[in-house]
Image: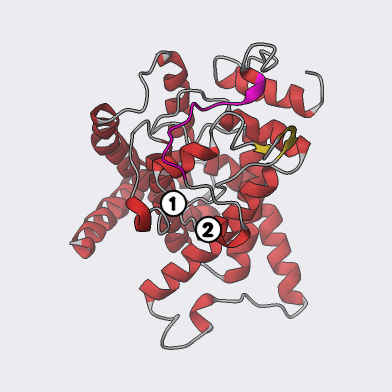
Amino acid sequence: MWETLNGWIGQIEGTLFQDVVLPVVYDLGFGRYAEEAFTGTEWLLVGLVQIAVMALILGPLEKWRPVEAVADRAAIRTDILYTVIHRLGLFRLAMFFLLAPLTDALEGHLRLMGWHRINVEDWWPGVTSVPLVSFFVYLLLFDLLDYWYHRLSHSFRWWWHLHAVHHSQRQMTLWSDNRNHLLDDMLRDLVFALVALGVGVEPSQYVMLVALSQLLQSLQHANVRMHFGTIGERLLISPRFHRTHHAVGIGHEADGAPSKLGGCNYGVIFPWWDMLFGTAVFTETYHPTGIRDQLPPPVGKGHDYGAGFLAHQWYGIKRLLRLR
């Protein structure tokens, strides 16, 4: 079934690339980027599949067992805009033109120094060279990287000012995952691009790694009363586990110290890193989400993070520059 689906997507991708994308690439004088354009076509198709799964499967799931009623539809529409920008490859297209010269120059310089990629497939010939095994190893590596990237964004005040845009959604839904400050996304893409360069992951494999991670994160952010049971909760991050990370006063503060940054449940796919590094909190409660400083005084400061995409981005910059 998987091979059939993969073959079907591959045929569509090939036709779309040959008949539509490639002629446009050459007409614009970007023929030297034909290979990258093919990968971009894959991002587009995979993104369309993701959005279809989100709308057709996760959407009804939210209606079946919602944690809370949605009161502000406009906020959800803004999150959908974030999703379209990221899942259909628009942000990655911009990042390609910004980061490709840097990563290409870096790789060329390192090769002149005698450095070579540390390909996972070469770690244990006959084992890690098996596609399914190498895919899972890459998944673990990037999930560990994601854990520490996420945890560090909760550790430094300047970084938190950007990441707080993600936490400012007080009505979490399946569309909330991509609600991020673009500067934070740029930093993350740079870090992950450098690591991908180092471990030698192939572009098509990287697309599937990211797509799987994104779909699981959409489920985790969904407004659904769902958990995976005592054992399952410790194997894969559930909506309940991740909701605790977004909980007011829990997911973004040090325990017992509201003025100090901290939190819990930083994991992205697997809860194992939280369990290993002592940041896992398993609870049966579905907490309200958001940031304490959004609450009215005296509990919070009544901060308004904005009501739209541009407002979110500008507010994050003001916080970063300490203008707010």
Does residue 120 appear to the left or right of 299 in the view shown? left
**Residue 82 x, y percent position in the rendering:** 49, 30
Q: Quadrant of the N terminus?
A: bottom left
- In front here: 189 or 30? 189
Q: Tag 2, which secondary structure?
A: helix
In which quadrant of the rendered view does residue 77 lie?
top left
Where is residue 173? Give x, y as percent. 40, 29
Structural crowding at the residue carrying mark 1, measured as other residues with C-alpha within 10 Å and reported as few (<14), some (14–19) or many (≥20): some
**How far apart, in angstroms, are the residues tagged by discs 2 and 1?**
9 Å
Q: Are marks 2 and 1 in contact (CB under 8 Å)?
A: yes
> Is 192 inside the magenta-drawn segment?
no
Q: Which residues are magenta?
A: 283-293
Could you say where residue 168 lies in the image, as x and y percent from the top left?
58, 25
Question: Height in image: 199 above or below 297?
Answer: below
Residue 288 magenta-drawn?
A: yes
Question: What residue does disc 2 label?
Answer: 143
- The residue depicted at 54 percent of the width and 17 percent of the height is 308
Which residue occupies 61% across, 49% down? 189
* Category of crowding for the residue at label 2, using alpha-carbon neighbours closer than 10 angstroms: few (below 14), some (14–19), many (at least 20): many
Q: Check disc 1 and report the residue beneath it.
A: 213
Q: Earlier in the sequence, mark 2 or mark 1?
A: 2
Q: Quadrant of residue 135?
A: bottom left
- Could you tell me which residue is drawn at 43 percent across and 57 percent down? 234
- Residue 235 can be seen, yes or no: yes
View extreme (right): residue: 322
Q: Amino acid at mark 2?
A: Asp
Quarter of the image with the C terminus in it: top right
- Circle 1 SS class: helix
Residue 255 to residue 80: above or below: below
Main SS class of the magenta portion in the image? loop
